[in-house]
Structures are given as structure tokens and as C-alpha cells.
Amino acid sequence: MDFILNHLLTLILFVPTAAAFLMLFLPKDRPVLLRWWALGASLISFGLALIVWFRFVPGQNGFQFTEQAAWYGVLNASYHVGVDGISLTMVLLTTLLMPLAILASFNIKDRVKPYMILFLLLETGMLGVFMALDLLLFFVFWEVGLVPMYFLIAQWGGSNRNYASLKFMLYTIGGSLGLLLATQLIGVTMGTFDLPVLFDQWPKITEIALPLGLSVATVKTIAFWAFVVAFAVKVPVWPVHTWLPDAHTEAPTAGSMILAGVLLKLGAYGFLRLVLPLYPVEAKTYSGALAFLAVAAIISGALAAWGQTDFKRLVAYSSINHMGFVVLGIAAAARAGNTPDSVIAVNGAVLQMFNHGLSAAGMFFLVGVIYDRAHTRDLNEFGGLWARMPVYGSLLLFISMASLGLPGLGGFVSEFLVVRGSWPILGLATALGLVGLFFTGAYILKALKLVLHGPLNERWAKLSEISTREILVITPLSVLILGIGVWPAWILNVINRAVQMWL
């Protein structure tokens, strides 16, 4: 028991990988066994994450549950992991969504074994980013998470999967190239990749022996933009967002759930964990540019979603719209530093990451439910499905209202906090961002009208209602969405205390 309690993060991180390795020895012609094996492994990580959550002490200085061991001694890189209130929230989200995504994949019949192995490896890659306290380790996990998602899209995606998977890989690796170079620059300059040390020392550096006569300010600005581009691609923000709708459209349902629910959050987490503390001066200088990118994502994402007739592409563009509010909260913190308003904005940004993970995963799952039955996502071909599938219709309405930001549900709390905190700091950008909320309501209501209301299309007269397994997938998401909307203090208390110490 002491071993488990002393190595909780390592166990959360590598239980999925160990299960994936052991799965290699399971018979491939036993799909039921393979599915339950993967689900069991993901539930173990979730259970351990709950232990960390309940043993976590909000407001305690520094990172908790830390583990450190020599890893790459010649580079002064170490296996160093730990969590604070921000990263722990993302760990909880990841370990929650993964078993739900695997449960949603129980209808996968083709090559079940590699499919489940890739999902478990993907979980390790994502969790490693949120836990890493070594910059080189952060980058390794950042890249590791790309590979399983590439193969999930390329092998189990739709008809245009090769194009979508290649575009996903090229965009994300292209953005990561600058991140790698900047990581090397910092490691060579400082002689360490340990993040707690870098957070303390790197922003204070004013004199460095640099080649080519470059000034410290120039080098930091270059490194700052290298980080920003890598994280902006992953969020994604306009104009580097075009890979996302294609990836979502072609990915299997569970892949879209994780892509929207967790992978997009890696970019926003990078802004919070690395950009703001390592580059406070540069972040303040270019906060206006970050605010512009946020507003562009909010408005363009909403307008693009409004113009879609493919249900899945509509939800994909909505993710760009919602993640724009996260970037807006980050831009406000970059502009103002540690002020009461910026703390509120970042609280909203982190909570929006969590809430969007719930609602976006739910929306993509419900789109997949109807696609499995109708084999089409064309909104114009539906109509009147509420009469045929009342339980499904009720769940779709509930999750859609959470995505819209209806008061009483989680999305409202986080978006309200972002707007409230950003308004005194970035008034014009916040006002323009609110225009996006108008179109958010428009595209959500459009989708509900075309799918659920009007006369029943006779083609769908025999569609079956949502199944018990599918209800088990959507129920935890719905409960959390309502719980945060009614009583957000249970999660905001953890986030807020971390944000106050972090900014």
C-alpha cells in the first residue's frame, strides 16, 4: 500500500502502457476479452486519479505527489512528475474520458486488439504532458500522444481518413518543431530541463553568452513564439485550425471524443504551464495578438459551425469557438499578470477546458450514436427524431444546452468567469468575443431543429433508441455537467488556489 501511495502518478501514467503491453499476449480472436481488458486498465487509472484528487491539498505551495529520478544524466534531464490544481484537473478529465471512450468503442469489430492498444498508449501520452515537471520529458510525452491518434484516424477513420490523418500529423509536428528547438535552447542555456528551476531562473536571465550577437530579449522573443505556435496549433486557433474539422470528421467516434475532450487541452495547458511563467514580459507585450487570435477563433468557429450541414463538422467547428474563450482568458492573464480580474479569467479558462472536455465528448458521442444507426451525418436528411428516439433526443438537448452555455450547466460558469475576468483587461476583445456567443446559440438551435424537430423522415421510422451501453457512456458526462453548473465550488476551489499561486 505504501508503494502505491508513494508512486500514484507513475501508476496512473503507466498502468495503461503496461496493460497495452500485456494485451500483446492476449488472443486477437477474443474481442470481448480485449475490450474489457482495456476498459479495466483505464478504470484503474481513473480510480487512482480519484485517490489523488481526494488526497490533494488545495492551496499548498508547489507541486504535490512529486516523483523524481535521474533519466538522461548527460543532459541534466530527469523523470520528474507532479501535479498542482491546474494539472490535476486535466488528469481527472483524461482518466474519466478514456474509459468512456473505450466503452463507446465496444461496437468496433475490426482489429480490436491494435485499436485498444493504441487507445491505452494515447492515454499515457496525454497524461504525461499534464504531469511532466521536466521540459524535455514534457516534449517527449507531447510527441508520444500524436502517434496513436494518427493511426486511429488513419486505420479506423472514414473514407477520407488518409488525408485527414496526414494533415493532422503534419500540422502538429510542424508546430512542434519550434517547441523542440526552443526546449533545446533553454536546456543548453540553463544546464537543466527541470521546470521548477526554470520557472524561478529563466525569466530573470538578462545576460547569456549567445552566438551571432543576438540579444537576450531577441532570443526570448523567438523562443516565446516557438512555444506559442506549437500550442496554438494544438488548441487550435485561427488560422492554424483547418486540420481539426478534417480530423474530427474522419476519426472514429471515440477518437473524436478524446481529440476534442483532451488533446485540444494540451495546447491550452502549454500556454498556462509554460508560456505565462517562462515568458511573462513577452506574454504581456504580445497579449494583444493573443487576444486577437482568441476573438478570431471564437467568431470564425461559430460562423463556420453555423454554415455546416455535416453534424460532426458542426461540432468540430464549435470546439474552435469554445476553445477561443480559453485563449481569451489566457490573454487577459498575459496582459495583467496576477490581479483579481486575471485570476478570475484564468479560473474560467481552466474550468472551460474541463467543461468543454465533457460537453464536446458528449456531443461527438451522440453524433456517433445517430451515425451508427442512420449512416449519415447530413443534417438536412434528419428531422423529427425526437418522436422516434425520445431518450436520445432528451440527452442531445441536454448536452447541446451545456455546449450553448445555458445557466445551471457547467459551460455557463466557465464562460461567465472568462468574460467577467477579461472584460476589465481586454474590453474590446471581450465584447467582440460575445458576438460569438450569439452565433453559438444560432448553430446549436439549428442542429437541434434539423435533427429532432419537424416531421419525421420516414427513412428513420425504424431507428432504434439509444442503448443501455450508450446511456452508460453519456450519463457520467451529464451528471458532471449538471453538478458543475449547480455547485461549481468543488472544482473551482482546487483550480482557484492553484491559479492564485501560479500567476
Image: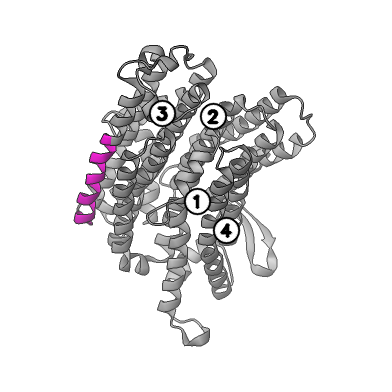
**Occupied quadrant, residue 45:** top right
Q: Which residue is mark 4?
A: 139
Residue type beneath disc 4? Phe
Residue behind mark 2: 100
Residue 276 included in the magenta stretch of the image = no
Q: Which residue is mark 3?
A: 480
Q: Amino acid at mark 1?
A: Phe
In the image, farthest residue toward the bottom: 213
* Separation (CA) of disc 3 from disc 2: 13 Å
Say which label, 2 or 1, has the lower sequence index.
1
Q: Secondary structure at mark 3?
A: helix
Which of the numbered marks, if any, corresponds to residue 163? none
Q: Are marks 1 and 4 in contact (CB under 8 Å)?
A: no
Image quadrant in which you'd find residue 104: top right
Q: Residues within 10 Å of mark 3 (few under 14, many from 20)?
A: some
Q: Residues within 10 Å of mark 1 (few under 14, many from 20)?
A: some
Q: CA distance from mark 2 to mark 1?
A: 28 Å
Q: N-terminal of the two: label 1 or label 4? A: 1
Q: How far from the left and from the top, in percent, is residue 234?
A: 47, 52
Along the polypeptide, which appears first: circle 4 or circle 2? 2
Q: Is residue 384 left or right of residue 263?
A: left
Which SS class for mark 1? loop
- Residue at image mark 1: 63
